[in-house]
Image: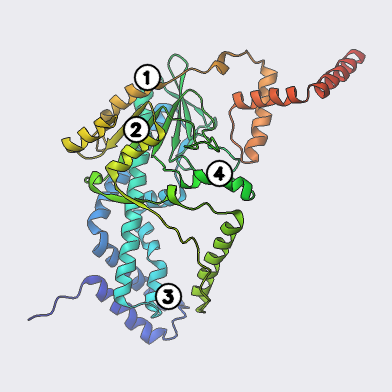
């Protein structure tokens, strides 16, 4: 019986090992000149061939998806008059160059292999898992972003204009946005008739905390189930409701984005709601243990086993279609819509319909397929009383803008309405001091 042919990436590995045996037995990787150029060439051939072996077909699909998203970004910027669209660091790197992004995922495993810390079989196992996980995660996030951007563009027929954030850069990430203790929107859109929609991507999210008391109040936000997109009628600047169950304001709509062909048959573990709350001290202890584990691995030393963590690790394994229904049951939105890139079987549609969930399937990357979603969004849009509360003079607007700029520099993003309201409440709480201040000002103005 003839032996199985050696795959290309293994050949590249053997060339790389042969080069190192001759030029760098100690594996210091401190090459210079032509040796450095040769090493880099062999290293990149190895990574490229392994990526092609593991996710070659999927990578071709990824390039098409990236092209579709970039096109939608240009359309949204031009249609809604934006300054630009900002993605998370991870997704941005993937969009810029998918193969380069995936090569980075192999960096540590590759050097562990070249140093002999892991064998070829282990490298194939962990390297393949890293590539598939990264590709799957980025494609999921990519399609979610495409649905969100396309939904905004589909609202342009209703004279949509993004009024928040005021600087015109639409951010599609949530990192660091909750540090001030609330959960702000990704954007607020004004429609014809002075109605508004507030969009929150992947909320609820954890908020900033200082000690165990704060963490106890915020814990539900760490373990809460997280739909793709929450939508609220009106201008909503914070959805966190600490101490409530669920810990966020009830959404008017949930939009779930499904990029996989067979998403409804996939299963996932739902662990969060069953997790035991941590104290701030336990949180810090686990962070330090994780840091030490990483250092021990780099330094090649052993450490004693960390004290047993949480012994209870309850989880519930559900199909994705059941999780969608759970979102609807838990958050009780007025309307929930599933946007599926591929066709959804009639039986799955019937199941979701019985749970009050609408399905838009075979959407692909065609924005026109989202027009029914735009119609539903128009129905939940609301006006805000604060908009017609009072006319503000130009001088007052300038004062508010100064306050807004100071808040922005401190990492706090608020609307002019919220700043005005909070300023008035601040004055009301210190009314005696304010009256005394006005008396002094009147005396000064009379004297001048």
Question: Which mark lies nearer to you, 1 or 4?
Answer: 4
Q: Earlier in the sequence, mark 1 or mark 3?
A: 3
Q: Residue 236 appears at what percent x and percent y?
A: 51, 27
Helix, strand or loop at disc 1? Answer: helix
Pointer 1 or 4: first along the chain: 4
Residue 177, image quadrant: top right
Q: What is the secondary structure assignment of the residue under circle 4?
A: helix
Label 3 residue SS: helix
Identify the residue at horizontal 62%, vertical 50% (top origin).
Answer: 212
Instruction: State the residue at coordinates (42%, 16%).
Output: 192
- Residue 287 shows in the view: yes
Marks 1 and 3: CB-CB under 8 Å?
Answer: no
Residue 12 percent across, percent down from the top left = 28, 74
Residue 379's disc number: 1
The label number, if any, that marks residue 397 in the structure image: none
Q: Secondary structure at mark 2?
A: helix
317 vs 302: above or below: above
Image quadrant of residue 78?
top left
**Mark 3, residues whose alpha carbon is within 10 Å: few (<14), some, or many (≥20)?**
few
Q: Is residue 45 visible from the viewing direction of this image?
A: no
Name the N-terminal-most of marks 2 and 3: 3
Report the front residue among 175 and 111: 175
**Residue corresponding to mark 2:** 150
Residue 218: mark in rendering: 4
Circle on res. 36? 3
Instruction: Classify 93 as above or below 352.
Output: below
- Of the 4 image quadrants, the one containing the C terminus is top right
Mark pair 3, 4: CA separation: 51 Å
- CA distance for labels 1 and 3: 63 Å
């Amino acid at each position: 019986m003839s032996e199985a042919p050696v795959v290309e990436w293994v050949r590249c590995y053997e060339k790389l090992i042969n080069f190192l045996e001759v030029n760098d037995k100690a594996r210091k990787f401190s090459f210079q000149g032509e040796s450095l150029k040769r090493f880099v060439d062999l290293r990149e051939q190895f990574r490229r061939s392994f990526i092609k072996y593991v996710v070659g077909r999927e990578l071709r699909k990824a390039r098409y998806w990236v092209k579709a998203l970039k096109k939608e970004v240009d359309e949204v910027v031009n249609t809604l008059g934006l300054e630009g669209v900002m993605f998370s660091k991870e997704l941005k790197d993937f969009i810029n160059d998918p193969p380069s992004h995936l090569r980075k995922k192999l960096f540590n495993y590759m050097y562990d292999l070249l140093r002999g810390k892991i064998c070829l079989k282990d490298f194939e196992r962990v390297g393949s898992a890293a590539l598939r996980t990264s590709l799957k995660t980025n494609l999921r996030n990519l399609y979610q972003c495409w649905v969100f951007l396309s939904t905004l563009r589909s609202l342009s027929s209703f004279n949509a204009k993004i009024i928040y954030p005021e600087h015109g850069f639409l951010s599609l990430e949530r990192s660091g946005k909750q540090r001030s203790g609330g959960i702000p929107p990704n954007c607020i859109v004004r429609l014809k008739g002075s109605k508004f929609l507030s969009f929150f991507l992947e909320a609820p999210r954890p908020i900033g905390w200082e000690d165990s008391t704060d963490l106890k109040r915020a814990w539900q936000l760490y373990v809460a189930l997280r739909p793709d997109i929450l939508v609220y009628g009106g201008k909503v600047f914070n959805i966190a409701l600490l101490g409530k169950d669920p810990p966020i304001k009830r959404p008017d709509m949930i939009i779930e984005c499904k990029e996989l062909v067979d998403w409804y048959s996939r299963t996932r573990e739902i662990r969060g709601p069953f997790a035991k709350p941590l104290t701030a001290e336990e949180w810090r202890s686990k962070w330090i243990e994780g840091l030490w584990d990483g250092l021990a691995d780099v330094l090649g030393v052993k450490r004693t086993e960390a004290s047993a963590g949480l012994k209870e690790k309850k989880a519930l394994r559900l199909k994705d279609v059941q999780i969608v229904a759970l979102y609807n049951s838990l958050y009780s939105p007025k309307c929930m819509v599933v946007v599926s890139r591929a066709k959804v079987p009639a039986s799955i549609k019937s199941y979701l319909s019985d749970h009050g969930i609408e399905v838009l399937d075979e959407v692909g990357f065609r924005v026109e397929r989202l027009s029914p979603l735009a119609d539903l969004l128009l129905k939940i849009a609301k006006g805000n009383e604060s908009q017609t509360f009072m006319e503000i003079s130009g001088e007052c607007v300038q004062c508010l803008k100064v306050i807004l700029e100071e808040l922005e520099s401190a990492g706090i993003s608020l609307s002019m309405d919220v700043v005005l309201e909070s300023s008035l409440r601040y004055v009301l709480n210190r009314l005696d001091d304010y009256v005394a201040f006005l008396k002094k000002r009147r005396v000064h103005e009379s004297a001048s």
